[in-house]
Image (cartoon, rainbow, N blue to C red):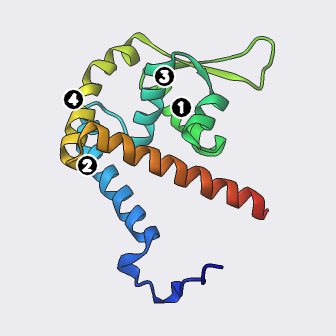
Amino acid sequence: MTPTPDVSAIRLDDRLCLALYTASRAMTARYRPLLSALGLTYPQYLVMVLLWEEGACTVGQIGSRLRLESSTLSPLVKRLEALGLVSRARDLHDERSVSVALTASGRALERGSPAVTASVCESAGLTLPEQAGLVNQLRRLADDLESSTRRDL
């Protein structure tokens, strides 16, 4: 049997939670000036990238992919609509379902997206294979944490 490590000895600077928190804040800060040029916030950008990749999606599908609650996502989508980048439409067969689609302006904005991605990747100092490996590790971490949270409820 493996002995339980003494986690109380882990100093703040060596805790995963702090490393993830500071990395997330640094990533968002790096995106901020680049996205400002596109007129987007970081969460808006994530919605736009999803729509550029997938085309029209329901609000539920967007929330599921981005792991955002409806209360966070609805105002975000409304703001994108006010900017003229997306349109929303209720499903004729299910009024609870709202579809979000890109407008011509939203589709045109995609042209500036590769420069944003390239700049952030360069700033992170990661090769594409290193980035892919890190993304996979973080995805597994998020999945494991969410699974353990559901088990604890």
Q: Which residue is mark 2?
A: 30
Q: In the image as oriented, which residue stretches furthest toward the front?
A: 1
- For residue 63, which numbered disc appears in the image? none
Give the residue drawn at x 63%, y 36%.
64
Q: Amino acid at mark 1?
A: Val
Q: Which residue is mark 3?
A: 51
Residue found at x 46% / y 51%: 138
What crowding class fits label 4: few (fewer than 14 Cα within 10 Å), some (14-19), or many (20 or more)? few
Q: Amino acid at mark 2?
A: Arg
**Discs 4, 2 touching: Cβ within 8 Å:** no
Q: Quadrant of residue 41?
A: top left
Whole-number angstrom distance, CA of label 3 to CA of label 4? 18 Å
Question: Disc 3 marks which amino acid?
Answer: Leu
Q: Position of residue 46 (x, y in %)?
A: 44, 35
Residue highlighted by disc 1: 77
Q: In front: mark 1 or mark 4?
A: 4
Query: Upstream in the sequence, badge 4 or badge 2?
Result: 2
Q: Nearer the viewer, mark 2 or mark 1?
A: 2
Amino acid type at image mark 4: Ala
Tell me if residue 36 comes above or below residue 153 in the rendering. above
Mark 4 and mark 2: span between their CA atoms?
13 Å
Per the rendering, the mark at residue 115 is: 4
Count up the numbered dots.
4
Estimate the spatial distance between the alpha carbons at disc 2 and disc 1, rounded to whole Å: 23 Å
Question: From the viewer's perspective, is 102 left or right of 94?
Answer: left
